[in-house]
Amino acid sequence: MPGRKRKADAAPEASKNDTNEIEEPERENLEYINITTHTGHFGSKPIKMNWGAATPEERGPVIATVKHGGQRNAIGAHSGGYCIYTALAVAAGELNPSHVPNLSQTSPVFDIGPFPSWKDPKAIVTIDPWGGCVTSAFQEYYAKGYDIRPTIAVTKAHIDFPEVKEAIRSGRLVPDGKILLPSGQTLVTKAAIEPVWYLPGVAERFGCSEATLRQALFKETNMMYPELLTRTDIKLFLPPIGGLTVYMWGDPTTIPDENVPLTVRVHDECNGSDVFGSDICTCRPYLAHAIEECVKGAQEGGNGVVVYYRKEGRALGEVTKYLVYNMRKRAEGGDLASEYFNCTHRVAGITDTRFQAMMPDALHWLGITKIDRFISMSDMKYDAIVKSGIKIVERVPIPPELVPEDAQVEIAAKVFVGYHGGSAYSVTEEDLKKVKGRS
């Protein structure tokens, strides 16, 4: 294309919409492969991105589809790791790579924001706050023919959770026909969110330079994204990781209202427990307890929120987690609470990579400024939320009777290192040495 070539060391051309005029979208030849290290292709004229701007017009849309290569303003691909399955569908001839989604009738089921946090470039750095309303926020771009993908979808659902039915049978919950049906189903609003990282903000959260962050991401992904190093002017990264889901009980439009009581749990994925009921940890019991408390709170006129992050095995992965399980169960002296964290460190070199510094973004996206009841014992989650400016009134530990026998190892180890046990838990060094799981 005439005018596309530029010198390798030249700055990207200024986009026409720097003067508030939206330029015509490029139409890539999808049969031709552009190598991103070649000049004049990837992001040669990126659409403006003013992260944290007051309006979507000032900020600009996230452009990360393959159709507008020169105008892309984000590194990576939509859908996280699922983009690989998209590639397989294209390779198999089942998906036309030029397909553009029909987004009519897909807008969120209730209006969210904008909140002050959306306009603060430091409050939200891992989510595109406008990602659920792109068709309305960026209408002019769609009218020009841009392929802009939502990174957030909000819908309604009926949730059928066995422990809720048990709570009804025991009398702890009473169906009201609005939040909780006689069948045991609960009515929720839920939002699926894909990560969009603003790299300068992520680096600041971790107390490192943006260059250090980019280099680590480049190296630890086996150099999958050279643009992390070659295009430091492009500040957005769509990482190949799982996203998160937010479940809301009650009236979601009142979640930001500090006068409406709010119950919250931030839960990190544990497939073995959450789905299959493994008793080596407290994950599903705590999740079930949180759902029960959210339902109660909503029935009493408040709201309940569960944020479910895809961070399997403390974000170390399920394979690593199972290796640790084997080490624990085969250890000389048995599965001791005193060795709980040490086993993880021996296998992974670290005990936890969830790094809760990024976690509060989902709460800020909802406009939350106060949590009345935080259903969590984690000191890391509590500290991250409070540091981000959200007030927490009460912390609620898991009731001791809900802790599975083999999970006593986990709960004792965590309370000993600082997890909030309230009046329900107290673990001394001598107590820790006595707690042992089954072999």
Image: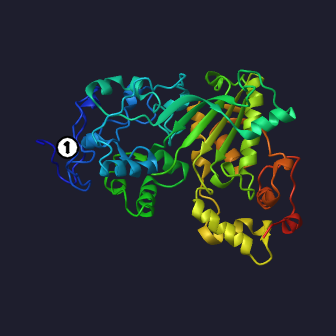
Instruction: Give left or right: position of 238 versus 188.
Output: left
Relative image position of residue 384 (x, y in whole percent): 65, 45
Query: Residue reaching furthest left?
Result: 2
Crowding near the residue tagged with mark 1, few <14, some 14–19, many ≥20 C-alpha atoms within 10 Å = few
Q: Quadrant of residue 102?
A: top left
Q: Which residue corresponds to mark 1?
A: 29
* Colour scheme of the rendered structure: rainbow
Is residue 120 depicted above or below 105 in this figure? below
- Considering the image in quadrants, where does the N terminus appear? top left
Q: Position of residue 206 (x, y in %)?
A: 55, 52
Q: Residue at x 53, y 25 (%)?
A: 113
Compared across the picture, whether 127 is left or right of 268 comes to left
Residue found 58% across the figure and 56% down from its top:
315
Question: Does residue 296 appear anywhere in the picture?
Answer: yes
The local secondary structure at tag 1 comes to: loop
Any part of residue 375 in sight: no
x and y percent of residue 345 in the render? 65, 68
Q: Quarter of the image containing the C terminus?
A: bottom right
Q: How many marks?
A: 1
Disc 1 marks a residue whose amino acid type is Asn
In the depicted structure, whether residue 207 falls above or below residue 265: below
The part of the image, by quadrant, that contains residue 29 is: top left
Could you tell whether 178 is left or right of 57 in the image?
right
Image x and y of residue 397, in percent: 80, 45
- As rendered, which of 341 and 78 lies closer to the eye? 78
